[in-house]
Amino acid sequence: MIRTWFILTMLLPATKSAEVQTGNIGLKNVLCTACETILNLVKTDESARNELKKRVENTCNKFKLLSLMCPLISRKFISETMKMLQVNEPKDICKSYELC
């Protein structure tokens, strides 16, 4: 649970850094790596998975924060991510809109 929260808190700054340094390709690589790492952590820990879902939902509900940090992520991606979380399909998040 603590590891998951640490990864989540590092995701936005790391994403912004990758965007500045390497452009869109770097941003996608960072997001995919972070996504895969988080999913590997939470697939064996139900409470961590629920916490992740809750935090992602909160982030999506506060879209202006995400759009400030990661302007290349579209509202449609966020919307589809929310749908997947609501139907308990987090494994598909990494594949959305050719992110990976």
Image (tube, rainbow, N blue to C red):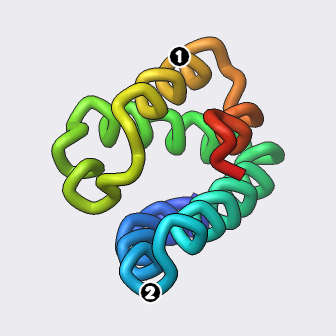
Q: Position of residue 28 (x, y in %)?
A: 59, 61
Question: Which residue appears at 59% of the width and 68% of the height?
Answer: 25
Which label belongs to residue 83?
1
Number of the label disc, if any, that sits on residue 21: 2
Q: Amino acid at mark 1?
A: Lys
Kind of residue indicated by mark 2: Gln
Distance from Cα at disc 1 to Cα at disc 2: 31 Å
User: Residue 3 vs residue 6: left or right?
Assistant: right
- In which quadrant of the rendered view does residue 36 lie? bottom right
- For the image, the number of numbered tags is 2
Name the front one of labels 1 and 2: 2
Secondary structure under tag 1 reads helix
34 displayed left or right of 40: left
Write the residue at 53% across / 29% down. Answer: 81
Percent coordinates x, y for residue 13 in the rendering: 36, 74
Label 2 neighbour load within 10 Å: few <14, some 14-19, many 20+: few
Q: Is residue 10 visible?
A: no
Pointer 1: residues within 10 angstroms few (<14), some, or many (20+)?
some
Q: Position of residue 83 (x, y in %)?
A: 53, 16
**Is residue 90 placed above or below 17 in the rendered structure?**
above
- Residue 62 against residue 2 in the figure, above or below: above
Label disc, if present, on residue 34 of the rendered structure: none
Which of disc 2 and disc 1 is earlier in sequence?
2
Q: Residue at x 51, y 35 (%)?
A: 53
